[in-house]
């Protein structure tokens, strides 16, 4: 990766971290939890170390490091950033008229279509199947533009999928917990089946043992992150049910 691109990425991530911390410290409403700031910084660092540094360099030569990059950029960073609730912070930090415009955009038909759990399932898990079972995997290591686009897709697909499942941002189109749980089960199955397929097949330019180590990491590492998403989903589901029971008795 060119030094100019690396510098741009570093400055962009630094800008996003500083901007989030500034907004968290200066908005006039209720105190913003420090834990969310920690989550935001952690998510940004996951992005940074996955695309710049030793992991990024080794991912071109060792599949297991490619899979570390995949877990950091496509699963862990989106989870941390989703839990940091940047959209909620944005809405309470900007002027009312601007917040209305953002809210209207979030309620628009294109956003509703893209953020629908079924759409995010195809973008996220479907994108991984396309990457690892076609020539895209070989091509994106050779084409710089495709390399960048694949990395952007990994993160954005992981983020919109996570948001569509845990649904903690102020979207007006939240779907039932049962439906989101069903989509989550399909996503886990698709991710695990793909990892088993990789374990039993070879990839060009990587040894069999290396691919198998990466596939094992994909299977167990992905399941661990998915477990955190499931925990958040079930916790919110429980709180929602408890609130409904409380209102029913009052």
Image (cartoon, grey):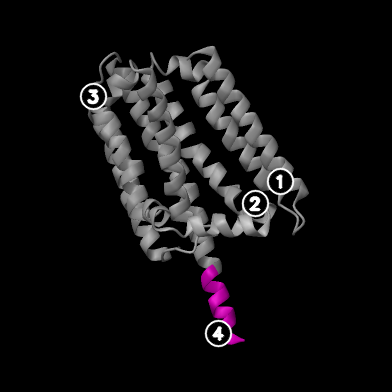
Residue of label 1: 23
Residue of label 2: 89
Do tag 1 and tag 2 residues touch (Cβ < 8 Å)?
Answer: yes
Q: Earlier in the sequence, mark 4 or mark 3?
A: 3
Residues in magenta?
A: 240-250
From mark 4 to mark 3, how far is it between C-alphas?
56 Å
From mark 4 to mark 1, how far is it between C-alphas?
38 Å
Residue 184, given in percent of the width and then of the height, sits at: 37, 53
From mark 1 to mark 3, how far is it between C-alphas?
43 Å
Residue drawn at x 49%, y 56% is 106
Which mark is nearer the camera, 3 or 2? 2
Q: Earlier in the sequence, mark 3 or mark 2?
A: 2
Residue 77, given in percent of the width and then of the height, sits at: 52, 37
Which mark is nearer the camera, 4 or 1? 1
State yes or no: residue 249 in magenta.
yes
Q: Which mark is residue 248?
A: 4
Q: Earlier in the sequence, mark 1 or mark 2?
A: 1
């Amino acid at each position: 990766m060119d030094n100019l691109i690396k510098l741009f990425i570093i400055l962009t991530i630094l800008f996003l971290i500083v901007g989030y911390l500034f907004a968290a410290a200066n908005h006039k409403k209720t105190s913003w939890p420090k834990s969310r700031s920690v989550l935001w910084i952690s998510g940004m660092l996951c992005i940074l170390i996955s695309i710049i540094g030793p992991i990024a360099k080794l991912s071109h030569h060792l599949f297991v490091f490619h899979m570390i990059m995949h877990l950091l950029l496509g699963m862990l960073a989106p989870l941390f950033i989703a839990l940091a609730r940047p959209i909620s912070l944005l809405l309470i930090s900007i002027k009312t008229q601007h917040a209305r415009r953002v809210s209207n955009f979030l309620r628009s038909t294109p956003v509703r279509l893209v953020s629908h759990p079924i759409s995010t399932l195809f973008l996220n898990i479907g994108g991984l199947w396309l990457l690892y079972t076609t020539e895209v995997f070989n091509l994106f290591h050779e084409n710089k533009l495709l390399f960048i686009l694949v990395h952007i897709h990994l993160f954005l697909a992981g983020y919109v999928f996570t948001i569509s499942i845990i649904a903690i941002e102020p979207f007006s189109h939240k779907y039932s917990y049962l439906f989101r749980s069903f989509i989550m089960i399909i996503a886990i199955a698709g991710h695990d089946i793909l990892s088993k397929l990789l374990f039993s097949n070879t990839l060009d330019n990587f040894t069999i043992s290396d691919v198998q180590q990466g596939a094992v990491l994909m299977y167990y590492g992905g399941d661990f992150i998915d477990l955190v998403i499931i925990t958040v989903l079930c916790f919110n589901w429980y709180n929602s049910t408890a609130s409904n029971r409380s209102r029913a008795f009052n």
